[in-house]
Amino acid sequence: MPTAPALSILDRSRVRSGQDDAEALRATVRRARRVEALGADGFWVAEHHAVPGVVGPAPTVLLAAVAAATSRVRVGTAGVMLPNHRPFVVAEQVAVLAALHPGRVEVGVGRSLGFTAPVRRALGAHASADADERLAELLDWLHGRGPLTLRPRVPAPPVWLLATGEGLRTAARLGLPVVVGGRLLREADPVRRYRREHPAGRVSLLLDVVVARDEASARRELLPQAVALARARSRGEFGPLPTPDEAAAASLTDRERADVERHLADAVAGTAQEVRTKVQELLDRTGADELLLAATPYDEEVEARNDARLVEVVRDLRTAG
């Protein structure tokens, strides 16, 4: 197992109850500055379109603001969804970022379509779009193999694939590093297969993590995010992040409650020692090189404390390794 996992923070630009969209974006930039000051290795942003509770529709644009507000931390996308975009346009945007912030830019790409049919129509995205073909095209543009010369001309930044089981096979074939989360964290075989097929490949684990004084407190801070996700899946609603009290009092169906419990079970929550132990177990099982840690507590001050604790947890893991 790698002895010194790199640590990046994923910020999903969540709108909190009582907050407007612009403030959510400013909070993302503030968080990036804090994360850099703490000594984290990377800061990543996500892509969501026309979602009331999430305001990250243009990850490369947001990444430009984040990179300009920081000076050292690596910045990345988790991710740009290729079925929604022309690969040449994505390559141009990434190249501009890489030219302005050399050595700091990484691009994570995914294969998901827009969340709803109206969003897919607005984006011109189609289920028939071959995600693998678009990924190969993006790599060709970035590496100077396209029929046009990409401008600005810069060294190609690292491209990570947000991977499912099929995505792991694609990443191994193309020699790409991968970000894995969800069920792949519970199933070691797909990651082992990726390692066999691409021995030099890098693996980053995407985890929702909260460190608090005890597990109950940590789960309470995760609850708003879990409730919002459960409602999104069952109702197509993705509203502002509720407060912990609002989330605890939320009226949910049996299916939604099951989704909430599943989300909490997949997350890593507890004291610093409990989180260290759980993360170490995941690193041992997957052989991961990096951690991409995510969680959005309702209170920004709680989020800041959590980020600081996460950095300390990873430092302890490095020291122990």
Image: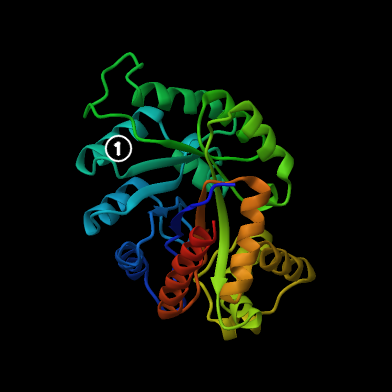
Q: Element type at marker 1?
A: helix
In the image, 176 versus 87, the foreground residue is 176
Query: Residue 112's spot in the image, x, y percent?
Result: 56, 41
Q: Residue at x 41, y 54 (%)?
A: 45
Q: Residue at x 29, y 32 (%)?
A: 92
Residue 137 occupies quadrant: top left
Residue 249 occupies quadrant: bottom right
Query: Residue 37's spot in the image, x, y percent?
Result: 30, 66
Q: Is residue 54 above or below residue 142?
A: below
Query: Residue 279's spot in the image, x, y percent?
Result: 61, 60
Position of residue 46 in the picture relative to residue 278 (left or right) = left
Residue 95 occupies quadrant: top left
In the image, 228 versus 137, the foreground residue is 137
Asked if residue 222 can be seen in this view, the reply is: no
Query: Residue 99's spot in the image, x, y percent?
Result: 22, 37
What's under tag 1, amino acid-wise?
A: Gln
Q: Is residue 55 above or below residue 111?
A: below
Residue under circle 1? Answer: 93
Q: Residue at x 55, y 74 (%)?
A: 211
Q: Quadrant of the C terminus?
A: bottom right
The colour scheme of the drawn protein is rainbow
Q: Residue at x 56, y 53 (%)?
A: 206
